[in-house]
Image (tube, grey):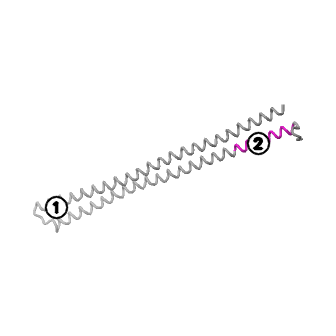
Amino acid sequence: MPIAIIAAIGVSTAIGAYGAHKTGQAGKAVGESQAQQHEFNARVADLNAYDAGVRGAEAETKFRTSVRGLIGGQRAGFAGQGVEVGSGSAADVQADAAYLGELDARTIRHNSEREAWGFEVEAADRRLAADVARRGGQAGATAGNIQAVNTVVGGVMQAGMVAQKYGMFGLK
């Protein structure tokens, strides 16, 4: 009878230790899966940041081109009316258009830089989340292994107490 009890304790201990180990490994796999998802999202944010920069540069260039076209139209209009385009009010109007156009072009650039920066921050946040998920998974694996060892030690102690109770192996 005591051998059957000790055998049952051994089987129960082995199953418990195996289960604790597998639970830890599953936690590690979940953490790694989450980390990979965060890293994918970080790469998407990197691409979005790059895209924001490219779109901003194109919009800025296009806007500056339209401002030059506007100033050219002003010059043609003044010249068509017989006004000296390089001095006086005509020159002031053109200078104002150039100045305001430059302010708007810089606003376009700064807006695209801010948009890109937002995506860069998102990418950094996603990479940090990936690291946290990976560390959490590793901690889960370690905890599972510690629980497995604890289960084995507990099972050995329980089997030893049964053996001692029945006077087995010269224990009393």
Percent position (x, y) of residue 11? Answer: 74, 35
Which residue bears the numbered disc 2? 154
Helix, strand or loop at mark 1: helix
Furthest toward the top, the residue is 1
Q: Quadrant of the C terminus?
A: top right
Q: Nearest the camera: 132 or 172?
A: 172
**158 drawn magenta:** yes
Q: Nearest the camera: 135 or 86?
A: 135
**97 lies left or right of 41:** left
**137 drawn magenta:** no
120 in relation to 96, above or below: above
- The three-letter amino acid code for the residue at tag 2 is Gly
Q: Quadrant of residue 110?
A: bottom left
Furthest toward the bottom, the residue is 87
First to last magenta residue range = 147-165
Helix, strand or loop at mark 2: helix
**48 lies left or right of 171:** left
